[in-house]
Image: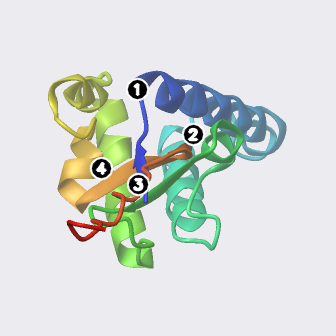
């Protein structure tokens, strides 16, 4: 199983996703809906996070670039429902000026508010936890 992802890697992944969503907003959404599209952008964010993190990749594009993935607290893939609960919690964390993200600095497994709500964790594929060596019988 992989180790939980560090806050720095998660932040870079979030920045990459922000750039991607920002481009979609600028190129697609603003020309169609105009500049007053806050709720539409929020909905697009939730769809993006929910669909990507419940997919076979278990990660957004930013997380994929950083070698991260999302799972439940046992490391298992998220159901669509859990992914959308997490995505809604992430949107809430964003709307409350990022306070939900700050929570990750104070939790043992670096879980942000949306992770605690959805019972999820972000894992780092590149920091695999090696299994404990098998015990050898005494006297051999």
Q: Using the numbered discs, state the Cα–Cα distance from disc 3 to disc 2 in whole angstroms.
A: 19 Å
Q: Which residue is mark 3?
A: 87
120 versus 63 height, above or below: below
Location of residue 63 by image quarter: top right
Kindly identify the residue that appears in the image at 31 percent across and 29 percent down: 101
Q: Secondary structure at mark 3?
A: helix
Q: Nearer the viewer, mark 1 or mark 4?
A: 1
Residue carrying label 2: 37
4 or 2: mark nearer the eye: 4
Residue where numbered disc 4 is placed:
89
Whether label 1 touches label 3, CB < 8 Å: no
Secondary structure beneath disc 1? helix
Quarter of the figure that contains the C terminus: bottom left
| Left-right relation of 13 to 82 | right
Q: Give the residue pinned by disc 1.
A: 7
Are the residues at dot 2 and dot 1 in contact (C-beta closer than 8 Å)?
no
Rendering coords of residue 10 (x, y %): 48, 32
Q: Are marks 3 and 4 in contact (CB under 8 Å)?
A: yes
């Amino acid at each position: 199983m992989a180790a939980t992802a560090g806050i720095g890697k998660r932040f870079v992944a979030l920045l990459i996703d922000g750039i991607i969503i920002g481009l979609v907003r600028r190129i697609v959404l603003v020309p169609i809906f105009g500049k007053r599209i806050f709720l539409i952008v929020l909905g697009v964010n939730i769809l993006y996070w929910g669909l990507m993190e419940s997919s076979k990749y278990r990660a957004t594009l930013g997380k994929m670039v950083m070698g991260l993935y999302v799972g439940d607290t046992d490391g298992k893939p998220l159901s669509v429902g859990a992914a959308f609960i997490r995505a809604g919690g992430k949107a809430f964390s964003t709307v409350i000026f990022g306070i939900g993200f700050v929570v990750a600095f104070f939790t043992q497994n670096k879980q942000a508010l949306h992770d605690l709500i959805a019972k999820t964790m972000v894992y780092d594929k590149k920091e695999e936890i090696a299994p404990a060596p098998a015990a050898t019988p005494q006297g051999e």
